[in-house]
Image (cartoon, rainbow, N blue to C red):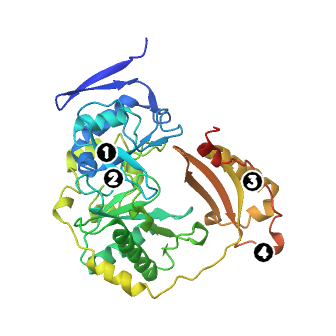
Amino acid sequence: MAKAASETLTLDGHAVTVSNPTKVYFPEAGITKLELVQYYLAVAEGALRGVARRPMVLKRYVNGAAGEPFFQKRAPEKRPAFIDLATFEYPSGGVAHEVVVNDVAGLAWVVNLGCIELHPHAVRASDMDRPDELRIDLDPVPGVPWPQILEVAKVAREVLSELGLTGWPKTSGSRGAHIWVRIAPEWKFAEVRRAAMALAREVARRAPDLATAQWAKEQRHGVFIDYNQNARDRTTCSVWSVRATKDARVSMPLGWDAFLKCDPREFTLRTVPELFKKHGDAHADIDAHPCRLDALLDLAKEQKGEPEPKVVMPVITIAQAKLKPDALAGLERWKARHPEVAARLAAEDVIVDANRGRATAWYRVRINLKNVPPELHPPPEQPDPDYDFRSEWLGTT
């Protein structure tokens, strides 16, 4: 039987075409593109609460979750009339007219473009310079178990509460967790980022064995509290967003009691719609609880006189590639050449960086030799493979 070329849905009075509806987007789970659209329609009330009136970067997986995505800041020239736009100015001086999804039809339309994940900015279209979200990203280094992330989340909740802030937790849908704080849109990006940095440092101070606020990856341990997600040009996966994982995991909003005893693996595209139908949206009241950053910014001033120690780590680059599997294959070849060194590495000593190229990512693997005696450090080698990311900007690839 021939595959259906398209299927048209009528949503909010608008016709939305789903092209190639039977195309498999999650091979291991057997989930099709139409199933992905249907998931977002099932949780639309919650998903729209996370993205409505926010400019959005389109992260498009046109070949499904197993394919390489590309980032599209600017709205497609050919788009339906019901898609709104907001003009976002980037620190580089660039300007992008970005998509704003405000209704179910718009939600289905962006998903049809291959947007498995939803990546909105922390601002509303009505004020593009003043965020209304403080975003706390708990990002574990490799090898950190989920219970440790929860312990760090408890400390973050404690700090927020002491400063008069209400945190709304969710699983990230990947390896970590997020805590959102709705704030009054009175502070610019730099101030919000400064407040987030102050929070990260305070959490790391209270739980030094569990968490870190160190920006350099080679200096991190445990759970990194990524304050830089509050920078002007950053977007973060929204509530109810599916992630491009093998099991189509969802970034699940939860109340604190449920969050602190949850297993993130339970929240997938196929399990969450029933949970939404039964329990609703745990973050439904988030907009009714805007907070102020004054106390956090006061804490930032107190921390200003405490310089962070600068530590130089023995880090080497051993692979850089356009595709992550190629970079990881280079890592395995390096381990085979240096088995004695590889045996001494902790999980956190293998640093895999995803770097933004012109429209897609490229990958670098670095090794931190801090746990390896100097006499065993390998001699300098050319990275294998040795992808030149500058070629993207030169237009040669």
Residue 252, disc: 2
Q: Name the side, left or right, on which 177 lies relative to 104.
A: right
Q: How far separated are the C-alphas under marks 1 and 4? A: 49 Å
Residue type for callout 4: Pro
Tell me if I can see residue 19 in this picture.
Answer: yes
In this view, the residue in front, 236 or 162, is: 236
Q: Are marks 2 and 3 in contact (CB under 8 Å)?
A: no
Mark found first going from the N terminus, 4 or 3: 4
Callout in the foreground (2, 3) = 3
Three-letter amino acid code of the residue under disc 2 = Met
Q: Which residue is mark 3?
A: 383
Q: Amino acid at mark 1?
A: Val
Q: Name the secondary structure under disc 2.
A: loop
Q: Nearer the viewer, mark 2 or mark 1?
A: 2
Q: Position of residue 151 (x, y in %)?
A: 41, 71
Q: CA distance from mark 4 to mark 3?
A: 22 Å
First reached walking from the N terminus: tag 2 or tag 4: 2
Out of 147 and 15, give the one closest to the viewer: 15
Residue at the front extreme of this rendering: 93
Pointer 1 or 4: first along the chain: 1
| 205 is higher (above) or lower (below) than 106 | below
In the figure, residue 225 lies in which quadrant?
Answer: bottom left
Earlier in the chain: of badge 2 and badge 1, it is 2
Task: Please tell me which residue is depicted at 35% across the width and 83% down the height of the picture.
Answer: 299
In the rendered image, which residue does mark 4 sit on? 373
Kindly identify which residue carries mark 1.
272
- Report the Cα–Cα distance between label 2 and label 1: 8 Å
Q: Position of residue 251 (x, y in %)?
A: 36, 51
